[in-house]
Image (tube, grey):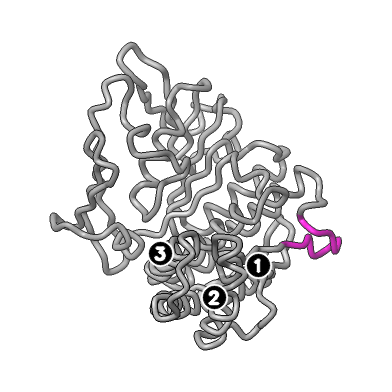
Amino acid sequence: MALFGANGAGKTNILEAISLLSPGRGIRRAPLDEMGRAPERLGWKISAGFSGPQLAHEVETSAAPGSGARQVRVDGKPAPQLALGAVARILWLVPTMDRLWVEGAEGRRRFLDRMALSLYPDHGAAALGYERAMRERNRLLKDGVTDAAWYRALESQMAESGARLIENRKRTVACLMRAQGEAKTAFPIAELEIASQAENTVMDQDALQQIFAAGRTQDRMAGRTLNGPHRDDLKAVYTAKGTPARNCSTGEQKALLISVILANARAVAKDTGAAPILLLDEVAAHLDENRRAAFYDEICALGAQAWMTGTEASLFAALGKRALFLEVREGIDGSEIVGLSGPEAAA
């Protein structure tokens, strides 16, 4: 699906709506109240049907104005947000990710966790459990609480969930490396590694619990938990050049990012028997014509349902008859979509 149109026409809104059919805050990570149409602020609702090998589901997610939480229904029944991860695997590449390799570890950690979620749906529950327990522990630290019993209870929860986080992240990186190595691709291979702040590299449940217990005094002085999987980072190296991703050119960084996304999509397809949904916002940025065509070829070879946006239809000319072209325009009462099927839209 090639969506094209002027800046501000509403192309990214379509991708954001689809991204909300997966757990989390979507491609923009915007507050719920900012997702509704302004200035009315009437709330919003998204409905979709999914079909694939041995599955068919109807999904609905919505948020009432001022509610602060969104509701999910799967096949007409209320469901937790995490249930969406088992219904559909959705991956995305958006312009804000272009600086992934050079900005803070938080973005890379979130990127790694989304890839882990696409392969291991239980990863979301582990992340949520860890964050909730750590939030409570941080509250105790800030309040200067010294009762060891309180800490042990929370640290046990953190260790259990944290060990699952660490294991899923390691398995994800291993899957991505295999997927890159097995593929014939026009994009550079990224050597991936998880960098941990912890001195203890074993990092199983018992080791984590010991780390949390040993760090209480220092953590209390800082008012927060200083060590654990919430401090992990994802490192990448341009393998052929031996250059860390952060030191690569802008074009090379984008190519490495695309390589990892494609590897993730291949890994999901191999694991589940169905390619994930790909949301690719302004995907042509920093790609020359040949590499852009190679990217489209690899997406089509995957058999993935891909939603791509760009300002001009010509950016997707290499797709030819393999894509449905849709022009998004800014109308009097919101965005308008005009369907132009086939390569004539790019002429």
Give the mark toward the camera: 2 or 1: 2
Q: Which residue is mark 2?
A: 166
Q: Is residue 158 visible?
A: yes
Q: Position of residue 303 (x, y in %)?
A: 47, 57
Mark 1 element type: helix
Q: Earlier in the sequence, mark 1 or mark 3?
A: 3
Secondary structure, mark 3, is helix
Disc 1 to disc 3, C-alpha distance: 40 Å
Identify the disc placed on residue 180.
1
Of labels 2 and 3, earlier in sequence is 3
In the drawing, what numbered circle is on residue 136? 3
Point out residue 279 in the picture as x, y percentages from the top left corner: 48, 46
Q: Is residue 170 left or right of 288 when viewed as pictured?
A: left
Q: Is the residue marked by circle 2 packed among few (<14), some (14-19), or many (20+) residues within 10 Å?
A: many
Picture quadrant of residue 218:
bottom right
Residue at x-position 52% and y-position 88%: 206
User: Residue type at mark 1?
Assistant: Gln
The amino acid on which the numbered mark 2 sits, given as a three-letter code, is Ile
Magenta region: 236-245
Residue type at mark 3 is Glu
Q: Against 347, is 207 above or below?
A: below
Q: Is 233 positioned to the left or the right of 143 in the image? A: right
Is disc 1 in contact with disc 3, using a CB cutoff of under 8 Å?
no
Indicate the quadrant containing the N terminus: top left, top right, bottom left or bottom right. top left
The tag earlier along the polypeptide, 2 or 1, is: 2
